[in-house]
Image: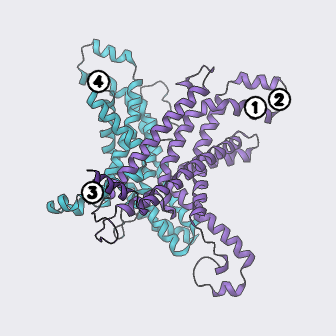
């Protein structure tokens, strides 16, 4: 019994498994960075949508409706690739000589010097930004709606005090809208958490990729424990992990809403 | 412009795969969701717990993981079950596993929508039905269901569009067999050939947008039909909440 326990303990703490546990950092980083950026982009988008200047308003509406109209995976893949290409193109205009361009046989990049190699950290940052961009569009709508839920009287009172438009925006609207925005933002956060499972599509060795590698059948005793296809066990662990994160997020957001809703009589509390 | 038109042609058959996945899973998911919603609302603790657990699990975890999990489970039963029965080629085929997982997934989300609508059905109408001596099945058929579907329809439309968007990750989790490629795989392969991200991904996005708009249009017509008894049929907004 104790031997079994020791065996499984040592199996679960071998190098590969430790790498798996370490790879959770990518997922957590992407979720937190993506969530923060989503709120920032959401605020920006809502500010654009509220703008008095028509073109800016159009930009805001365009952003929030087009990004939401296509699947998140599509944008999630497209943005890092497009950003990388844009940087490479810009580099190419700066450093590529005509000879180098002529010598380049591949379709991209224009010349070899302009090639930008992206490692895991770069892809992780780009993935977080694209998560932020995609879910920022969702957050734009949530925040836009929440800003309009702030009681008119509050804004009128602020104007009557002689506050400027930006003062009203920052001190009254944005300060008060969080109570109304929280239920929607909690939804967006859940979507972001679930979208972090897609990191492996950007060649990041994240928890999904490692679960696949660890569970793959192994028949060579020299490589490690001989077992057949155990992938479903590892995916089950991930399945439970995500459910647990959802449960925890729900609890945290519930507590946050109860705290933010103090003193405000509204349905936002329930 | 030429390349754009060529791309449109290349993507058309690929879009059919996405449409197939959505069309194969939506009706089944709808029926399953009705039972799940009733189960969640039922007084029987076992049925209620089970439905609650199912809905929570499938709403709380990523579809991507669900695909991997179901597919690897299927694989691990291959030698012991599917092979002897001679159906492994069918059970493990993406065109079967894909709709299966999507059905489970959309059933959970739809059930949550239906459950919310079920709780919003006016109590008075149900009480009146009971007072008339209707049996529970009659109550459901004549009073609860017509109310429920009208309340849930706008949110359900939204869910259908989301499900269609979710079909984009099917082939990232399941193996691509031969030329059976959906929009995303086609876009990715074309991108890997000539590195023109803007063209290929935009065309794929255009297909997704177009189908989404068609879904909104058709479901809007159905909504109008459902609401035809109202004095002024409330038109469904073309851009509902979009959040799942």
Give the Cα distance between marks 1 and 3.
56 Å
- Closest to the camera, between mark 2 and mark 3, is 3
Describe the element under mark 3 as helix, strand or loop.
helix
Q: Nearer the viewer, residue A41 or A215?
A: A215
Question: Is disc 3 on the same chain as disc 2?
Answer: no
Left or right of residue A72, residue A57 in this image: right
The span from disc 4 to disc 1 (Cα, nearest Å) is 48 Å
Q: Which chain is purple?
A: A
- Mark identifier at residue B74: 3
Q: Is residue B73 above or below residue A176?
A: below
Whether residues under marks 2 and 1 lie with C-beta atoms below 8 angstroms apart, the answer is yes
Q: Chain of mark 4?
A: B
**Disc 1 and disc 3 on one polypeptide chain:** no
Q: Which residue is mark 2?
A: A163
Distance from Cα at disc 2 to Cα at disc 3: 64 Å
Residue ranking furthest to the top: B131
């Amino acid at each position: 019994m104790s031997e079994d326990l020791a065996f499984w303990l040592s199996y679960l703490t071998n190098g590969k498994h430790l790498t798996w546990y370490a790879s959770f950092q990518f997922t957590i980083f992407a979720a937190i960075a993506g969530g923060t950026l989503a709120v920032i982009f959401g605020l920006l988008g809502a500010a654009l949508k509220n703008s008095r200047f028509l073109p800016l308003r159009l930009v805001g509406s365009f952003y929030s409706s087009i990004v939401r109209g296509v699947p998140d995976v599509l944008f999630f893949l497209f943005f890092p690739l497009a950003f990388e290409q844009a940087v490479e193109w810009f580099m190419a205009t700066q450093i590529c000589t005509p000879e180098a361009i002529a010598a380049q046989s591949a379709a991209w990049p224009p010349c070899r010097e302009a090639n930008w190699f992206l490692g895991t950290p770069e892809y992780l940052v780009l993935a977080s930004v694209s998560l932020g961009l995609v879910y920022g569009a969702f957050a734009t709508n949530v925040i836009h709606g929440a800003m309009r839920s702030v009681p008119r009287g509050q804004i009128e009172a602020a104007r009557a005090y002689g506050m400027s438009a930006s003062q009203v925006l920052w001190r009254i609207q944005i300060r008060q809208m969080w109570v109304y925005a929280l239920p929607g933002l909690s939804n967006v956060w859940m979507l972001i958490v679930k979208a972090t499972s897609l990191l492996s599509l950007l060649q990041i060795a994240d928890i999904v990729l490692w679960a696949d590698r660890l569970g793959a059948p192994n028949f060579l005793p020299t490589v490690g424990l001989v077992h057949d296809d155990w992938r479903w066990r590892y995916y089950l662990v991930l399945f439970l992990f995500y459910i647990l994160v959802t449960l925890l997020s729900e609890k945290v957001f519930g507590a946050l809403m109860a705290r933010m809703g103090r003193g405000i009589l509204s349905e936002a509390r329930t | 412009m030429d390349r754009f038109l060529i791309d449109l042609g290349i993507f058309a058959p690929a879009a059919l795969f996405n449409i197939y996945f959505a069309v194969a899973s939506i009706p089944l998911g709808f029926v399953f969701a009705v039972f799940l919603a009733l189960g969640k609302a039922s007084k029987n603790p076992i049925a209620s717990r089970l439905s609650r657990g199912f809905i929570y699990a499938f709403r709380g975890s990523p579809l991507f993981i669900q695909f991997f999990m179901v597919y690897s489970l299927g694989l691990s039963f291959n030698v012991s079950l599917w092979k002897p029965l001679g159906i492994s080629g069918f059970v493990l085929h993406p065109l079967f596993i894909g709709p299966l997982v999507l059905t489970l997934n959309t059933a959970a989300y739809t059930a949550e929508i239906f459950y919310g609508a079920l709780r919003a059905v006016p109590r008075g109408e149900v009480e009146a039905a009971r007072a008339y001596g209707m049996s529970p099945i009659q109550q459901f058929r004549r009073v609860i269901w017509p109310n429920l579907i009208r309340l849930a329809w706008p949110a359900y439309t939204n869910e259908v569009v989301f499900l269609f968007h979710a079909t984009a990750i099917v082939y990232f989790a399941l193996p691509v067999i031969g030329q059976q490629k959906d929009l995303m795989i086609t876009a990715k392969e074309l991108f890997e050939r000539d590195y023109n991200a803007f063209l290929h991904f935009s065309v794929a996005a255009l297909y997704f947008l177009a189908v989404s708009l068609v879904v909104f249009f058709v479901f809007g017509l159905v909504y109008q039909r459902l609401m035809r008894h109202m004095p002024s049929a409330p038109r469904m907004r073309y851009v509902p909440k979009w959040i799942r």
